[in-house]
Amino acid sequence: MRKVKQNDRKAMIRVSDLVTHYGERKILDGLDLTVFEGEILVIMGGSGSGKSTLLNHLLGLLTPTSGTIELLGMDFTHASAGNKQLLRRYMGMAFQNGALFSSMTLAENIQLPMREHTNLPQSTMDILTQMKLEVVNLGGFENLMPSELSGGMIKRAALARAIALDPELLFFDEPSAGLDPIVAAELDQLILRLRDGLQMTMVVVTHELDSAFTIADRIVVLDKGKIVFNGSVEAIRECPHETVVALINRQPQEQNQADSDAFIERLLN
Amino acid sequence: MHTPDYRYYVESYLMNPLIAIEHIGRTVVKGIEELGFATVLLVQAVFWIFVGSFKKQPVRVSAVFLQMMQIGVAAVPIVAILSFAVGIMLAIQGIHTLRVFGAERQVVYGIALSVVREFGPLITGILVAGRTGSALAARIGTMRVSQEVDALKVMGINPVRYLVSPVLVAMLIMLPSLTFLANLAGLFGGAVFSVAELGMSFTAYADRCYSILTTDDLAQGLIKSLVFAVIIALVGVTNGFRVTGGAEGVGRSTTRSVVLSISFIVIADMIFTYFLNR
């Protein structure tokens, strides 16, 4: 039996000692992370910190060098193709730029996961589609093509497709990037409503501070492939770590601090 | 992508032949890698066609029909027109050549055999490569760039099963069909000119064709069109899946896909013609 975790909460995602490489370069360096049921975990960090890589590993799009990822108590890294397929039915992902299939209408986009994973009749799928679109305030837009939608609508449509099968785990990449502040705030509220209404566990990757502080139950800050902060919104303001301070105060970090030897080596190479 | 500076290459090759050898080596390795990738794609696509339904990932009949419409039915007018034109051209050249021997009426021999054995499949292959090979590379490349392929994977939909298998099936059905149509159009083109030029009747022309052509002649063309179908599908999707570098990358892959598949078709045609006629 696994030891009962704090607050008796179920661990939905458990990452242990994850090491990944991109070619020769090490991206994630022995990462340990647990996400509990019903919480919104926000992953933050600068460009190149490894947050997108972590997300891609959680989604099973990349294979790690070592370490394991457990989703819903099942080993996802070493699962057979059939089990992976089974687990994916319980996962939803809203991509940064939507990744809606451009040759399909909104309704067809949302119905694709239903068609592939269930045997529902068309009429039921139509009703479900309507409901999903109502949830994200896109009711009545089901026959539009993705190219006819605005940026905010695409993000919401992507969300509707991600929740098409009522997943237990929802992943969200940069929900508010490229949106105006009002639409971004609306999207934050939508994410909170979804969590409260459907009890989903969410992992959100973002670098928008306002958005992170609004939706997060817990924030994880990555830097150079390691977790440098893991705690609540209140705790992050008091965290003394320089990367975290720089991140929340929007300070530029001084990079390449006078390593003259390395510089000369690069120059002469 | 910057354009390679050829003068730099030539100069460095002259100074150090090892660089030239390294360059050749890298190109060969890249080519073999790509060939391996294409082979894996082909094996997977065939695997999903046969095993998909047992793994709850069937290749959808509707998707196959959609591809058949786009690859085949939409190409009917252009295939018919071009084959008709080639038929006329063959008749003109044939009559011109045979007039030397005073044997103009034997032109039907040349037209019938060269259209059915060679020009029908070749014209169809080149046309479909231009139309569909490019479209395939562009479609899959764009889907990769906009993360749609990732979205498929996250949904638990195998991209090869969803994007490649239907194309392969549709190609294998439509290319022989189009080739057959091209044969008819080519023969008809030859007939129109021969009738006008030599004053022979349509019925006589058709009778001659019918007695000249054997099942073997027809089969040879159709078998070749099956090979072309695999080439076009595979080159298109391989280039699509290997797109890197955004919209510009998609453009590069599209061009590459057309050039490569037409080259492969012509070369494969030569090889197969050689072996099928031994």
Image: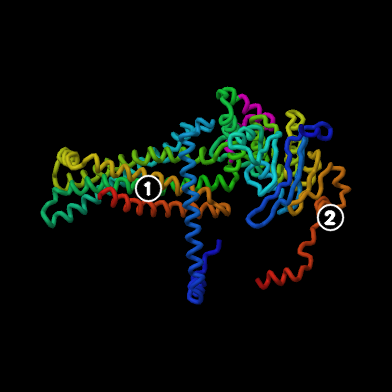
**Is residue B229 left or right of B8 when viewed as pictured?**
left
* Identity of the residue drawn at 71% across and 51% down: A28
Q: Position of residue B252 (x, y in %)?
A: 50, 55
* Identity of the residue drawn at 65% across and 71% down: A269
Neighbor class of circle 1 (other Cα within 10 Å; few <14, some 14-19, many 20+) is some
Q: Chain of mark 2?
A: A
Q: In the depicted view, which residue is nearer to us: B26 or A158?
A: B26
Q: Position of residue A255 (x, y in %)?
A: 77, 62
Residue with the mark numbered 2: A242
Q: Position of residue B240 (x, y in %)?
A: 51, 48
Residue A192: in sight, yes or no? no
Q: Quadrant of residue A95?
A: top right
Image: magenta residue range: A127-146
Tally the numbered discs.
2
Residue B18: in sight, yes or no? yes
Residue with the mark numbered 1: B127
Rendered view: B72 above or below A166: below
**Is residue A77 left or right of A42 when viewed as pictured?**
left
Give how far apart the Cα atoms at labels 1 and 2 are.
62 Å
* Identity of the residue drawn at 41% across and 51% down: B261
Tag 2: amino acid: Glu
Tag 1: amino acid: Leu
Look at the numbered disc 1 and give the secondary structure of its residue. Answer: helix
